[in-house]
Image (cartoon, helix red, strand yellow):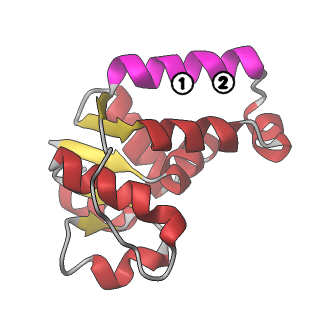
Amino acid sequence: MRIILDTNVLMSGLMLPDSMPGHIVNAWRKHHFYLVVSEPMLEEIARVLAYPKIRKRLNWDEKTISRYIALLRFEAEVVNIAGVAANVPTNPNDNHLLATLIASKADWLITGDSDFNELAGQYSILTPSEFVRRFL
């Protein structure tokens, strides 16, 4: 199974290992599914990991963040989303996630972002709790 994790799910999973997102991140670490990302996603993840609040919570320095991004590049399938038309009407800043789903033809996009609620009928989108209930 090929899965896209929204940054909110990945961050929650890293910070709260016993949460639903934490179970998902742990399942990825145990190779229960393949992770799919795009360059804009990796950039967003790196940016969010650099937030002082997140760095403090994870106790990560710049070197650790760089290593984690390198791990994602190595472990995940990185897809090219150039030229892929995608529109998240309620939040255009999330267009790159939908474009990643479209370009990769991944099985699921896992997100806790309510901006994707209206798209869940058109695309393979689940909340973290839905994903855990169905697959973990």
Q: Provide the major secondary structure of the magenta segment.
A: helix
Query: Toward the viewer: 36 or 54?
Result: 36
Whether residues under marks 1 and 2 lie with C-beta atoms below 8 angstroms apart, the answer is yes
Tell me residue 31's x, y (percent).
26, 27
Q: Is residue 114 above or below residue 94?
A: below
- Range of the magenta residues? 62-75
Q: Would residue 52 appear left or right of 82 to someone viewing this image?
A: right
Neighbor class of circle 2 (other Cα within 10 Å; few <14, some 14-19, many 20+) is: some
Q: In this figure, which residue is indicated by the disc labeled 2?
A: 65
Q: Helix, strand or loop at disc 1? A: helix
- Residue 69 lies in magenta, yes or no? yes
Residue 124 seen in render: yes
Question: At x 39% / y 75%, what residue is drawn?
Answer: 116
The kind of residue tagged 2 is Ile
Separation (CA) of disc 1 from disc 2:
6 Å
Q: Which mark is residue 130?
A: none
The kind of residue tagged 1 is Ile
Q: In this figure, which residue is indicated by the disc labeled 1?
A: 69
Neighbor class of circle 1 (other Cα within 10 Å; few <14, some 14-19, many 20+) is: some
Q: Is residue 39 above or below residue 114?
A: above
Tell me residue 108's x, y (percent).
23, 56
Question: At x 78% / y 28%, what residue is drawn?
Answer: 59
Q: Would residue 34 appear left or right of 25 to someone viewing this image?
A: left
- Residue 4 lies in magenta, yes or no? no
Q: Helix, strand or loop at disc 2? A: helix
Residue 27 seen in render: no
Question: At x 54% / y 24%, what residue is drawn?
Answer: 69
